[in-house]
Amino acid sequence: MHAVTVLFRLKEGKYPAFVTEIRRNAQLSLENEPGCVRFDVCVDDMAGEVFLYELYRNEAAFADHKKMPHYLEFQEKAADLVADKSVRCFTLDEG
């Protein structure tokens, strides 16, 4: 399994619009991508931050995710909403 974490720090006043867009992206990822196993959206509205935990069957499934129309649309809409973004990828230790 391939785990991805993303921390978004949002621009002032952009939190509501961003949360709407990321929730839509998460839903469409789970509905339309067989390789997407989990896509959690965790929010801290007081800090204006959103943390994602995504789980894919493998790295190729994550690469496919980044080519999906809903992902590309999200990237375009989110560009003006995000102040900073940190992405980390991990391999799930299945012992």
Image (cartoon, helix red, strand yellow):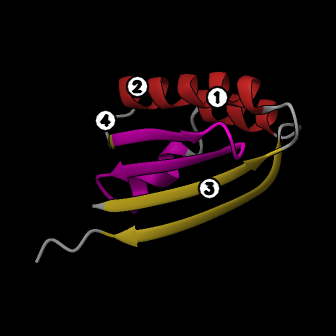
Name which residue type carries label 1: Val
Q: Which residue is mark 3?
A: 7
Q: Is residue 84 above or below residue 15?
A: below
Q: At which x and y percent is residue 51?
A: 55, 49
Mark 1 closeness class: few <14, some 14–19, many ≥20 residues within 10 Å:
many
Q: Given contact means CB atoms under 8 Å apart, are the residues at marks 3 and 1 in contact? A: no
Corner quadrant of residue 93:
bottom left
Mark 4 closeness class: few <14, some 14–19, many ≥20 residues within 10 Å:
few
Name the element at disc 3: strand
Name which residue type carries label 4: Pro
Corner quadrant of residue 16:
top right
Mark 3 closeness class: few <14, some 14–19, many ≥20 residues within 10 Å:
some
Kindly report the distance in space between the C-alpha atoms of the residues bearing marks 4 and 2: 6 Å
* Magenta segment boundaries in residue numbering: 38-65
Q: Which residue is mark 1?
A: 19
Name the element at disc 1: helix
Q: Is residue 60 magenta?
A: yes
Kindly report the distance in space between the C-alpha atoms of the residues bearing marks 4 and 1: 23 Å
Q: Which residue is mark 4?
A: 34
Q: Which mark is residue 32?
A: 2
Q: At which x and y percent is residue 17?
A: 75, 23
**Which is nearer the eye, 49 or 21?**
49
